[in-house]
Image: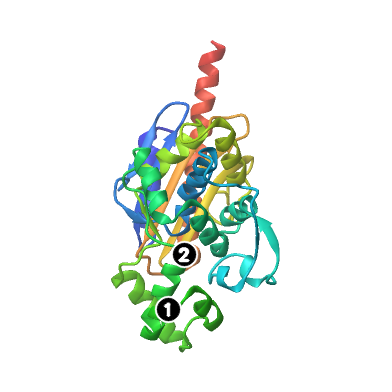
Amino acid sequence: MMLADLQYNIERIAKGVNASWAIYVKYLATGEEIVLNADVQMDTMSVIKIPLLVTLFREWEAGNVNLAKRLALMTHHKRLGTGVLQVLDNGLEFNLHDAAVLMIIQSDNSATDIIFDAVGGPGVVTEAMHKLGLDSIEASGWAFDWFRALSATMDPSYADFSPQDLFIKGYPTLTPREGAEARERFHFEGNQSFGLSSARDMGRLLEMIWHSECASEESCAEIRRILRLQQFKTRIPKYLFGATTAHKTGDFEPFIANDVGVIEPFGKSPVVVCLFSAHHRGIWANLEDAIARISEKVWEYGLSIDGVQSARAEK
């Protein structure tokens, strides 16, 4: 397979669903890249938790954060959306490192805002990314900000809610149709993102993590380990038998399905894959499967170029 064939196959799969795409792929062994709208700033949704994780470890190295610091879970910590902390009893004790792991492998929004608080807020994350030269990466706000904005689209009285108020009250009570219309309006007309990044810059950050260039070797090794523990596997890893995938998803069903990470085929060279989508109209499962099929093509090409390199080395 030629690189041009891979580009064609990726574009063919992407065109098969009604969505906007931004794609960046890089084979770390050869430097070969596939790009499709790779410099367009997209809503990351929970993918922004990777820059937050990197910032946490940078702050830990600077002596500003104690990863072993213990907290007692309280109602004001709890957030809507994904995660397990919101359903656990108040008084549960855990440390910041535990929160960081949950933030990635379960996309826990309660843990996310605990980590945002620990590093000093979203602005600190944005600044850290810009210092790394990743100017398109921006942390738009706490997870709470996004859920409150969504809820206020459904009921304007929610605009002044505190984190505890929002969690206790929950989403406004609407009919299924009213709720779907409000979510669509929020996505297509709203201006509250969860986070922002181009596919290229998120890919560059992943490459920095792999080469220990955005933090120390110790920190980057732990970030890689946490990313490999990801438990949501319906996108990049779905069809990749014999490969490890260190990755992070982000979504707003049915409009956004994102997944970014590094595919590590057993005994083969790693490849960075960043797949952002938005403005999707259609069946959610089809969007997820398109990401999985694109990733499968990326993986297959990686195996082919590794085979060519091995043959050349034997000669």
> What amino acid is labelled 1 in the image?
Ser
> What amino acid is labelled 2 in the image?
Ala
Cα separation between marks 2 and 1 = 13 Å
- Residue 17: x and y in percent read 39, 61
Q: Is residue 149 left or right of residue 58?
A: left
- Residue 255: x and y in percent read 40, 67
Residue 91 shows in this picture: yes
Q: Is residue 134 left or right of residue 167?
A: left
Labels 2 and 1: the sequence-earlier one: 2
Q: Is residue 97 left or right of residue 274?
A: right
Q: Which mark is residue 143?
A: 2
- Residue 133: x and y in percent read 34, 38
Residue 234 position (above or below residue 82): above
Whether residues under marks 2 and 1 lie with C-beta atoms below 8 angstroms apart, the answer is no
Q: Residues within 10 Å of mark 1 (few under 14, many from 20)?
A: many
Q: Quadrant of the N terminus?
A: top left
Q: Which mark is residue 240?
A: none
Q: Residues within 10 Å of mark 2 (few under 14, many from 20)?
A: many
Q: Residue at x 56, y 66 (%)?
A: 82
Q: Residue at x 40, y 47 (%)?
A: 10
Looking at the rendering, which quadrant does residue 148 occupy?
bottom left
Q: Secondary structure at mark 1?
A: helix
Q: Nearer the viewer, residue 47 or 66?
A: 66
Q: Which mark is residue 151?
A: 1
